[in-house]
Image: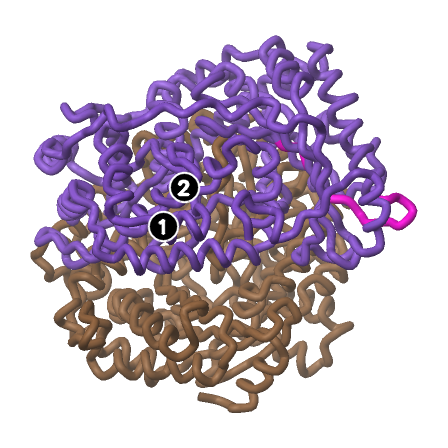
Amino acid sequence: MRPARRAAAPRAALALIAAAAAISCATARAPSSVPSGEAAAVGAEGDPASPVASRAEEPRAGKARGPAVADAGPLGELGRSYLESSLSRYRRARSASGADIAVLCLGGRKRAALRASIRADRSASRGKEALVDALALAAAVRGPALAAALRDAGAEAELDLEAPGEVALSISCPIGGIEALSRTVAEALASPVFEQDSFEAARRALVLYELKKEGDPISRAIAVAEEGADDAASFLNRITLSTASASWKASFAADRVAIVVVGDVDPQSLAEGLAEAFGALPARAEPSVEARAAVVVTVAAPVAAPAQAEAAAQPARVAAGSLRSAPVTSLPGAAILRVEFPAPLQTEGGAAQSDDYGPMLVAIAMLGDLLEREITAACGSGVRVVAEAPEDPIAPASVTVRGTFDRLAARAAIERSISALASGSCASTSPVEPLSPIASRLGRYKAKALVALYEGGSSPEIAARVTRSIAAGGDGTDYFRAAALIASVGADDVLRAARARLAEGSSAWAVVGDPSIAGGLAAQGSR
Amino acid sequence: MTPRGNAGYSSEMKRSLYAATLCIASILSGGAIRADSPEIDRFVLGNGLEVLACRDDATPLARVRVVFKAGAENLEAESAGSLSLLERLVLRGLSASVDERASGPLEWKGYATAESIGFGAVVPSSELDGALASLASVLASPPMDALEEAKEAAALAVRASASDPDAIYEAAVTRRLFSKYPWRRDSAGSEKSIRAATAESLAPIASAYLAPGNAALIVSGRFDPAALRSSVAQRFAGWKDAPAARRTVPAHPKPGVTRPTWLVYPDPSMPEGKGSVELRYRGPDIARDGAASLAADLWSGLVADPNGRFKSAIFKEVPKLSAKDGISAGYVSQREGGTISVSALFEIDPALPAAERARAFKERVRGFELTEMRSDPSYYSQQEYEAARSRLAARRDEEADDPEGRIEALAFWWSAASTDYYLGYPSAIAAAGPKDIASFIDAYVMKNLEVIAIRMNPTDYGRERASLSSSGFETITAANAFWWPK
């Protein structure tokens, strides 16, 4: 067999074997808050006339969200043609119960990816509700009917807890089995059978995963920066079958569900078939938020004082200039420094899109190169830097510095890099003059931002991008539109985003590592 | 294969002790493998360059990779590491190359292994032609001007490997298993051979092996097929081949060792209280025994099931193994250096010395399970064979559906075997069965000798040092692990 590729990306999914039903669990991370988001519009031109739209709708490219596509160059033409061809293969529908359905045809793909996403509800905070959702979903899909259907279809399935604002069941199966499997998933979600054995198996897998995650410094840094659930394993162990079942019944509703299929399928007929299959999901049950919060507070009570439990029910957010630290023993003499910048969407008062999304993609590409140079000069060549642009409008941007021995130097390097960018400079290619005006290298960095955004491209990854777009209140097409969005970015846009969101906007700083380093940086206080 | 990029990733392939425990479980059944007809536009230029183009419109990107059937396998001890140096030099040239059709220097990555060397980039589709132009220009005349810098970086990497526990363990096992030509499995080379390299010594190696008749150019993603053909012909047709300069290499002996060889590595990366034991054999080489290599792949699919007979019996019969999913078994396909490995994690227990545990593990794996698997055609049912074939097919399809996975799969199989081998793989696996498995086990396990290696924390090792030594275990250290003297 071909040697396996080594997983190296700090946020790559970690999978756990879950024997009973081929359900494994991907990386968890705390959800970011999302707007309540009624059913997504089609093609960004308004909701279908009827709230019940079982007929698949063809989206339109006409009103691209964000800045107008003004770039007439090759990148602009590429963005336009990519958007048009993607939209021509994309269909949306909505089930009678209100579940969002989307299907993308990718010719030549041998397997289909099905993603059943449950959007975080408004009470989601600190990851607790996401954990209850994940456990309930894991238990529900471990029922014998779905397990048998997965086996029969030659399918693989995993829980994806990594995406902000949702928990999702991600299934990959041969094309021929997608319709039957979709129906079984619909039945499992509409009438979940919570059995003690499958519940226990699901909980064991999740607890094991959370324990491993706690020991991983990068996962720890993400959790600290995002105020994720810091006692996830013990929290999971306190959830009972009846608690999980009650939480599910109190909060699960079709309008939190998005079903996305990507593969070599007929998007029109499959979207309509899925709308019908998922029509039996329960419609919204009021007052779900209050009932759900009560369940979570009850479960959290043994470790959280009442005031803390109440605070835990507030939406998660990135506090301005905050800095948190956590010691870990696995990095003797070193630390990981992580900075998160809120997603463009989060500060737009619930607007479905921010004009800063495209510019932020380019700005982060520039920041990465600036920072690599600064960190190498300040901390040596052994320190790794990763600058991650927001994958979608609801994801944060981040910078991670790994293996630094000098916490103050690393922080200063990040601040110098941001300052340079906010002053209108990016890294040059000249060994003599380290900085260039943003405009002089804009084309290169737009190309780099495009590559960073689309470098994946597997069917499950695209399905995840579509569900997250829907979770953000969009129509699922943000992924297709982003290329044109990047092409349209001007130097002034980058400068504006860098100033507003990187230099002057809120950010969350986290440091994990050797207590002497983590403590030392924490002692410096807020930025 | 982890590429070395502008950011300086390591190019070494390493086997991860825990990789198997992190694999996504897949339970598959039924469904015969369908005829495989990937949409690959395949053509060969007059200079021998094979071009494989796979269109996929999922993203606005294109991927380009050139791969050569060249690596440490093609070198002598005195020139070991030369192709890694060339890889660094070409990568540097590519990273500095700016074609007018691109928006600036592209982010190329490179890798050099024992059997292949390659360079690749991911670009907006609108910059594909510029990427091809840069690639053609640099490969036609690999730059040598930064040789001293490349030698320094390569020497640094060699020194770093001497303090990397995984590298030390791998080097030690490989040195024993490929004892006649150990440098042919070490792409990095020795510091001595690297320091000795000159532009004059590298030039003939470059012209022989970094040549179009020894290369495949693979393009995937969003592109215009006609424009691509035209661009490739324009850029690469003038690239000169030198087939006479390439030499064939003798096979690594099998068995790789003259007697079962027992090793123990006091490994600081192992947690206290946990150990691992591995049996490793010289396996089939695709270039020399393709049929056995296919059977070995099918065998890998059979033994992968954590609930199957093989792993269940090992877990049940060998005392205090950590977990069933801590047992790994599989074959690594290579053109010249295939290996078979069965390993397990175990709990350290003073009442059960590690030396005895290793013997029990070997006895159960080789003496019972593989012996039984060879002699009893019903060891695995027909349904289990189908499930194994489906597992292999699913993995292949998943690779093909992932733009990066597809280009990696094509590059790997082209360099390890050929495009025809890759395209014919599904039907070949479908045709393989119990007889082939029995034949493979007979030739590559029963008539073979193994290295048995334990990894344990130095503290645990200290407690068992005497019993390990008296049981014939040789202790691995950084000083004796590598084929070159430290």
B376 left or right of A414 in image: right
- Tell me where the magenta segment starts and ends, as one range: B341-353
B360 left or right of B71 in image: right
Asked which quadrant contains residue A485, the reply is: bottom left
Pick the residue in front: B143 or A71. Answer: B143
Pick the residue in front: A240 or A224. Answer: A224
Residue visible at 84% across and 31% down in the picture: B317
Q: Secondary structure at mark 1?
A: helix
Chain of the residue that carries numbered disc 1 in the rendered image: B
The quadrant of the image that shows the C terminus of chain A is bottom left
The reply to whether callout 1 and callout 2 are in contact (CB within 8 Å) is yes
Q: Which x, y percent locates residue A500? A: 29, 81
Amino acid type, callout 2: Glu
Q: Secondary structure at mark 2?
A: helix
Q: Which chain is purple?
A: B
Question: Does the rendering let one see residue A45?
Answer: no
Q: Which residue is mark 2?
A: B78
Residue visible at 49% across and 74% down in the picture: A404
Residue B182, placed above or below residue A162: above
Indicate yes or no whether the magenta region holds residue B348.
Answer: yes
Amino acid type, callout 1: Ala
- Label number found at residue A497: none
- The outermost residue toward the right is B351
Please tell me how crowded label 2 is: few (under 14), some (14-19), or many (20+) other residues with Cα within 10 Å: some
Q: Which x, y percent locates residue B405? A: 39, 39
Shade of chain A as shown in the rendered figure = brown
Q: Which x, y percent locates residue B239? A: 14, 34
Q: Which x, y percent locates residue B152? A: 37, 60
Residue visible at 34% across and 78% down in the picture: A502
